[in-house]
Amino acid sequence: MEKPQLPDFLQNITVVLARTSHPSNIGSAARAMKTMGLTRLTLVAPNLIATPQTEIPPVFDAERPENFVLPEESFVLASGAKDVLENARIVATLQDALADTTLSCALTSRKRELTATMHTPRELCPNLIEAARQGEKVALVFGNETFGLSIEEVMLCNRLMTINGNPNYFSLNLAQAVQVVCYELFSHVDLSMDYLRPEHEYATHAQVTGMVGHLQDAMDAVGFFDRRPPERLMRRMQSVFDRAQLEREEIDILRGFFHNIEKKLKQD
């Protein structure tokens, strides 16, 4: 069975990473996105730190955001999602990133002096998917790994989203948070999984009956029926295999086994 096509409306959903500091997190976030059918990524003023793999990180110039080039470390962690990074939009401010959006969700796990209600991804995602389906532009906004989104950045968004977790220990990596939210979104896309299910070639009634007859011959050959009448027992065996709904290959395996038993008995 052919793989289903991703719906076009997923292109109306953008993941926005604001002031991300670790090069690998950008690549891992891209991988998490593409796994769930999202490919539109916007980076807001990346503020990359030095790492063992990126000893001299590129410096973002707000005057020339288009000149910013991600380091190789980001592409390595992106794995098969390098195209997401190559096509990423890079801007200087969150205002620029959200200019054409109608729904923007700020991801936050902190209490803030805001009156807006915080929702979980499971609560918000059905509405976000429906908005994207109707052609609206939707943004999922994630903040810096250490400080998250500033209150000014949160106030630019019109929805608050939080990932609920252990109140005594809640420490999701940025890419993990992106994965959780993208999964919740994708779970509402209703994409068929039939292509993942193996195709079955079920055995016909005649094939099952033939196999049961072969089984009876093998049982008879080993003396199983010396003190047992075969009729009632074989009816039960026929019923067992009918309920099992065997595949043709399984019938062949069983008949091969019975054949070897008969062959071995003749040799002895």
Image (cartoon, rainbow, N blue to C red):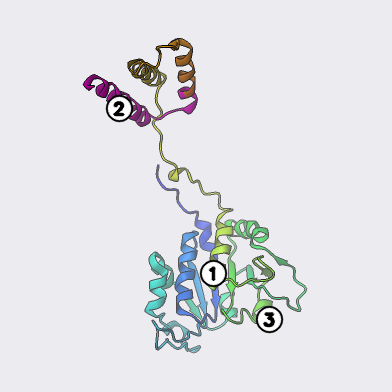
Q: Earlier in the sequence, mark 1 or mark 3?
A: 1
Residue shown at 54%/68% (left/top)? 176
Q: Amino acid at mark 1?
A: Val
Please indicate, yes or no, whether residue 14 appears anywhere in the rendered image: no
Q: Amino acid at mark 2?
A: Gly
Q: Are marks 2 and 3 in contact (CB under 8 Å)?
A: no
Find the distance from the CA under tag 2 to the CA under tag 1. 56 Å
Q: Earlier in the sequence, mark 2 or mark 3?
A: 3
Secondary structure of the residue carrying tag 1 is: strand
Instruction: Identify which residue, 232 or 81, lies in the foreground.
Output: 232
Name the disc covering residue 151, or none: 3
Start and end of the magenta stretch?
Answer: 241-268
Relative vertical location of residue 104 with respect to residue 144 in this rendering, above or below: above
Q: Amino acid at mark 3?
A: Ile
Name the disc covering residue 173, or none: none
| Residue 263, horizontal then vertical, whole percent | 25, 22
Relative vertical location of residue 145 with respect to residue 203 in this rendering, above or below: below
Query: Circle 1 sits on which residue?
Result: 15
Query: Circle 2 sits on which residue?
Result: 256
Dominant secondary structure of the residues highlighted in magenta in the image: helix
Residue 205 falls within the magenta-colored stretch: no
Relative vertical location of residue 16 with respect to residue 54 in this rendering, above or below: above
Secondary structure of the residue carrying tag 2 is: helix
Residue 264 falls within the magenta-colored stretch: yes
Crowd class of label 2 (few under 14; some 14 to 19; many from 20; radius 10 Å): some
Q: Residue furthest right?
A: 115
Mark nearest the camera among 2 and 1 is: 2
| Residue 51, horizontal then vertical, whole percent | 43, 84
Q: Is residue 78 left or right of residue 145?
A: left
Q: Earlier in the sequence, mark 2 or mark 1?
A: 1
